Image (cartoon, rainbow, N blue to C red):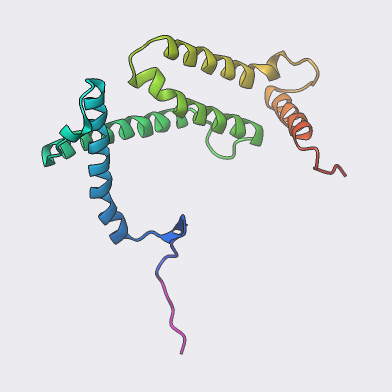
Amino acid sequence: MEEINSAPKRKPFFGIILSDTLLLAAIPFIAYLFTFIYQAGYLQAFQLPSQFVSITIVDIFNIGGKILGVIFLVFSSVNLFSNFLPKGNMPNSLARRARGLLLLFLLAYPFLFLFEWGTISNIVLVVLIFVILIMFLLPLVSRKYRGTYLQKMEQLTGEAEKDINPWKEIY
């Protein structure tokens, strides 16, 4: 008689199969780690030795709430921007550009919204605008191809893939 295992298969993470028990055991460790890093950075800003770090349960909840707030802001902004993407099947060239832009925005998000505005924030904003213009304006100004905007974008993406991958054989 053969046993039927209805448990869902779990994917390993760095060779470790993650279970609910393991994740629940890791949460306090991660909370203590983030609290220690936060307080050590705070003491380092005032040039005090890290031996003065003391962790209390109040600190863990306070810093954990701040970290969860930042994570919530990042995920809610990704959700907000994903609502503006077309629904259903998106053309491949547009989907590639949207994924790249989303990754770039996630990398630029702390510099634009979480830190004090300064020179680095200005540079990140200029680079972000420049990349957006190159990604989405290039098909409009290209007079090499005819057709709609998406057709021009597909042709530019196809040409770029052909230039990038010299090992791809053309038949």
Q: Which residue is nearer to you in this view: 92 or 159?
A: 159
Q: Is residue 89 above or below residue 74?
A: below
Q: Residue at x 27, y 32 (%)?
A: 69
Report if residue 53 lies within the magenta region. Answer: no
The prevailing secondary structure element of the residues shown in magenta is: loop
Residue 78 in the image: above or below residue 30: above
Does the segment drawn in magenta span residue 3? yes
Specify the quadrant of the image occupied by residue 160.
top right
Task: Give the image quarter of residue 81.
Answer: top left
Choose top left, top right, bottom left or bottom right for residue 64: top left
Residue projecting furthest to the bottom: 1
Q: Find residue 76 and report its horizontal and vertical position in percent.
A: 36, 32
Residue visible at 56% across and 30% down in the picture = 100
Please give the name of the residue rendered at 81% of the width and 18% of the height, measured from the top-left corner: 144
x, y percent for residue 145: 79, 21
Q: Number of labelled discs?
A: 0
The magenta span reads: 1-6
Residue 77 sits above or below residue 118 on the image:
below
Q: Specify the quadrant that holds the C terminus.
A: top right
119 on left or right of 145: left
Q: Position of residue 170 (x, y in %)?
A: 85, 42
Q: Nearer the viewer, residue 86 or 63?
A: 63
At x 24% / y 31%, what residue is drawn? Answer: 40
Q: Position of residue 152 (x, y in %)?
A: 73, 24
